[in-house]
Every structure is written in C-alpha cells, then in structure tokens.
Image (cartoon, rainbow, N blue to C red):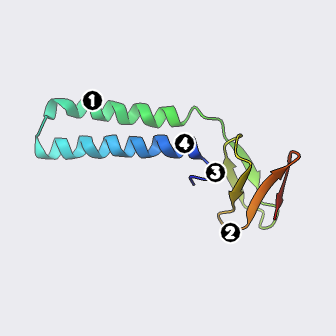
Amino acid sequence: MKDRLPHRTKHYENALMFLGIGIILGITFIFWFLVPLFFSLAIYQYFKALRYPVLQLQCPKCHTKQKIEPMITRFLCVRCQEIIKKENDVWSTS
C-alpha cells in the first residue's frame, strides 16, 4: 500500500501509533491526563489522511480496481504482481 498511497499510509501509521500510546497509557494509568491528547491526535491524523486525493485505476492485465494517489507514476498490482507504469498519460504493464 505504501507504493500506491504514500501520504495516506504515513498518516494511518501515525494514527495507529497515537492510538496505541493512548491505550497503553490508559491501561497502565501512567499520565492518564495525556490519554485524551493522544486519542485526539489519532483522530486528527486519521482525518488528515483522508484529505489526499485518490484516483481509481484498473489494472490492464487482471482488471482489478486499485486506488492510487495522483503523483504516483509506477506501482505494483496487488493481485497479479505486475508493475504498472504511467507513460504519456497512459497506464500500461511492463
């Protein structure tokens, strides 16, 4: 997923990290006053990930629909493991 959605993946990972820290602090009662802060940071990172535009693309070989960010020019198909490249605004397999 990192090669197709690099910005979203980064923010989803940050959201999971903040959520995990908040849960651990909540369970152990250490710095319990920081738990709402970490939960709010997790929610913020999740919604920040949703603001990046995503294109739906169909693999030319196996016809699987995939989501990619507009700046991506090359990625690996999830289903057939074929490299898909953008050449002159046309997506093709190599």
Between 39 and 7, which is closer to the camera in this rendering?
A: 7
Residue assigned mark 2? 81
Q: How far apart, in angstroms, are the residues tagged by discs 1 and 3?
A: 30 Å
Which of marks 3 and 1 precedes in the sequence?
Answer: 3
Q: Where 29 sits versus 78, above or below?
A: above
Give the amino acid type for the residue marked by disc 4 in the picture: Arg
User: Which dot, 2 or 1, sits closer to the camera?
Assistant: 2
Crowd rating for badge 3 (residues with CA inside 10 Å; few <14, some 14–19, many 20+):
many
Residue assigned mark 3? 4
Tag 2 and tag 1, C-beta contact below 8 Å: no
Q: Mark 4: which secondary structure?
A: helix
Tag 1 and tag 4, C-beta contact below 8 Å: no
- Where residue 29 appears, as percent x and y from the top left, is 10, 41
Give the amino acid type for the residue marked by disc 2 in the picture: Gln
Residue assigned mark 1? 37
Tag 2 and tag 4, C-beta contact below 8 Å: no
Tag 3 and tag 2, C-beta contact below 8 Å: no
Q: Quarter holding the N terminus?
A: bottom right
**Which residue extends farthest left?**
29
Q: Quadrant of residue 21?
A: top left
Report the number of discs: 4
Which of marks 4 and 2 precedes in the sequence?
Answer: 4
Which of marks 4 and 1 precedes in the sequence?
Answer: 4
Q: Quarter holding the C terminus?
A: bottom right
User: Which dot, 1 or 3, sits closer to the camera?
Assistant: 3
The reply, left or right, for residue 44 in relation to residue 60 is: left
Q: Residue at x 70, y 40 (%)?
A: 71
Q: Residue 8, which numbered label?
A: 4
Q: How far apart, in angstroms, are the residues tagged by discs 2 and 1?
A: 41 Å
Q: How far apart, in angstroms, are the residues tagged by discs 3 and 4?
A: 9 Å
